[in-house]
């Protein structure tokens, strides 16, 4: 608890007790001892205020607030807008070194520097942009790390409004303070940030190499399914055998997929993996939760979210452990397939995943299955079994009954090695960003301590 005199109030627009929490006041006092800039000293805007003009044939990404994580862009899924709208909304066309701030939603306050490999791109109103001049006293990479540190987090919590739908108004973001460290230190933070970015790009490259080895081994590099629009089936060959009457189920390409796998040695997923449906032994404690949107469809990684027991959604149904494979049964064409790593404990996942655990006698490698199910052929094949249109859903049995080719152990090892390299590079990127954040917080505390010592000595 802290007491604040009326004469000490700094923000008469916010008289809530939360604004003047003791921890927030202490952190703010640290910053006030240091040279700083406020975001309003720079160019600040937000994105498109109208409805997006979607265009699936466009190459212009629409980066939403949900894509913004602390110091990186989470490539879980992008939609695309028309070139016409991109030209119309020129002020929100992303530029190199733009600082993006998540302003509406559960993680309002997260920020990251726009990543060049995603350009051209645009943003909605729920994302704010801060642009720094080339010779600005603040480096955008340093600003991102600072705002994702505890010295930015407390400002987010002070200014964020709403509970069910937290929001950071643009006018509030403009009031944020950013510590003005010396140029050399800011450059050190930028170097760490860029190293992390390069590691993530290399991680994606290693994943692509793993996929190339698999596809080449299965002669899928140049495979093209037929585009025949007609496939005639008798009642005996269709409904009486499968129970399906929808024409989409009997597309010729699905028969070609099956014939391709059947032409070589194969097994079924159910032969190699157990189907895990184990419910959590609920305890009143925080859990790591993964839902479908937490799986990065660009590389098959995932982002677990720590949640209190009482805050978990009703669909948090399955307890998982290291090595388990999660396969989304909702919109399977997205390729939301991931493997649980070693560092996460008390993990609960959405019931919209099929969870597989390798059988003790299985000769199939987890990494190989992950790459296989995320390949273009299998993502399309899974759509054969969907029972929806705009929101396709498949059943656990559809995955368990899929045939998978037997693959030489040497090839499996090669694929697994690439995936492990990809994972290691991604973890190294996380470590570098954590180091950058720690360095910023330590620098602020050391400088503030020295200033206070000088004051105590009468300096």
Image (spheres, rainbow, N blue to C red):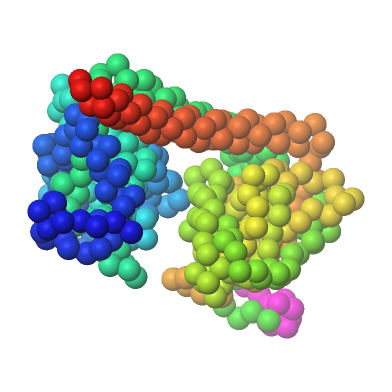
Whole-percent x and y of residue 122?
25, 47
Residue 69 seen in the figure: yes
Q: Nearer the viewer, residue 15 or 215?
A: 15
- Which residue is depicted at the point 49% across and 69% down? 311
Q: In the visual, does 456 lie left or right of 387?
A: left
Q: Nearer the viewer, residue 27 or 235?
A: 27
Q: Which residues are magenta?
A: 232-242
- Which residue is depicted at the point 79% across and 53% down? 358
Whole-percent x and y of residue 268?
79, 58
In the image, residue 95 sits, relative to residue 310, either above or below, namely above
Quarter of the image with the N terminus in it:
bottom left
Quadrant in the picture for residue 2: bottom left
Whole-percent x and y of residue 304?
54, 53
Quarter of the image with the C terminus in it:
top left
Quadrant in the picture for residue 324: bottom right
- Which residue is depicted at the point 58% across and 57% down? 288
- Residue sitting farthest toward the front: 457
Membership of 234 in magenta stretch = yes
Q: In the visual, does 259 lie left or right of 105?
A: right
Q: Nearer the viewer, residue 288 or 363?
A: 288
Membership of 375 in magenta stretch = no
In the image, residue 405 sits, relative to residue 385, either above or below, namely above
What is the magenta segment's predominant secondary structure? loop
- Which residue is depicted at the point 81% across and 37% down? 408
In the image, residue 292 sits, relative to residue 46, either above or below, namely below
- Residue sitting farthest toward the top: 184
Quadrant in the picture for residue 119: top left
Residue 80 seen in the figure: no
Q: How many marks?
A: 0
Whole-percent x and y of residue 207?
58, 36
């Amino acid at each position: 608890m802290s007491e604040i005199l009326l004469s000490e109030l700094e923000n008469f627009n916010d008289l809530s007790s939360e604004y003047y929490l003791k921890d927030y006041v202490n952190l703010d006092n640290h910053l006030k001892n240091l040279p700083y800039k406020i975001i309003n000293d720079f160019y600040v805007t937000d994105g498109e205020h109208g409805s997006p003009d979607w265009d699936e044939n466009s190459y212009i990404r629409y980066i939403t607030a949900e894509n913004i994580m602390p110091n990186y862009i989470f490539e879980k899924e992008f939609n695309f807008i028309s070139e016409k709208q991109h030209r119309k909304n020129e002020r929100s066309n992303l530029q190199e070194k733009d600082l993006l701030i998540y302003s509406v939603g559960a993680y309002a306050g997260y920020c990251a520097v726009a990543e060049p490999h995603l350009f051209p791109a645009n943003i909605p109103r729920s994302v704010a942009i801060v642009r720094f001049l080339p010779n600005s006293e603040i480096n955008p990479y340093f600003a991102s790390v600072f705002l994702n540190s505890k010295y930015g987090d407390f400002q987010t919590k002070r200014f964020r409004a709403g509970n069910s739908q937290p929001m950071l108004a643009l006018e509030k973001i403009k009031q944020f303070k950013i510590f003005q460290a010396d140029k050399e230190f800011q450059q050190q933070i930028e170097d760490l940030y860029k190293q992390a970015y390069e590691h993530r790009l290399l991680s994606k490259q290693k994943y692509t190499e793993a996929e190339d080895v698999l596809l080449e081994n299965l002669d899928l590099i140049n495979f093209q399914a037929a585009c025949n629009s007609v496939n005639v089936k008798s009642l005996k060959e269709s409904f009486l055998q499968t129970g399906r009457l929808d024409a989409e189920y009997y597309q010729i390409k699905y028969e070609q997929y099956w014939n391709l796998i059947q032409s070589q040695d194969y097994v079924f997923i159910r032969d190699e993996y157990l189907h895990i449906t184990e419910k959590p032994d609920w305890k009143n404690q925080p859990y790591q939760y993964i839902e479908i949107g937490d799986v990065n469809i660009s590389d098959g990684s995932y982002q677990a979210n720590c949640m209190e027991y009482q805050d978990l959604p009703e669909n948090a149904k399955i307890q998982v452990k290291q090595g388990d494979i999660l396969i989304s049964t909702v919109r399977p064409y997205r390729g939301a397939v991931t493997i649980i790593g070693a560092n996460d404990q008390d993990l609960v996942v959405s019931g919209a995943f099929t969870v597989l655990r390798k059988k003790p006698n299985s000769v199939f490698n987890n990494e190989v299955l992950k790459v296989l199910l995320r390949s273009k052929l299998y993502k399309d094949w899974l759509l054969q079994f969907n029972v929806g249109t705009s929101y396709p859903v498949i059943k656990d049995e559809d995955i368990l009954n899929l045939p998978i080719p037997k693959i030489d152990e040497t090839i499996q090892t090669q694929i697994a090695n690439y995936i492990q390299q990809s994972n290691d590079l991604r973890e190294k990127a996380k470590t570098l960003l954590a180091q950058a954040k720690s360095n910023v917080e330590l620098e602020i505390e050391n400088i503030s301590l020295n200033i206070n010592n000088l004051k105590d000595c009468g300096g």
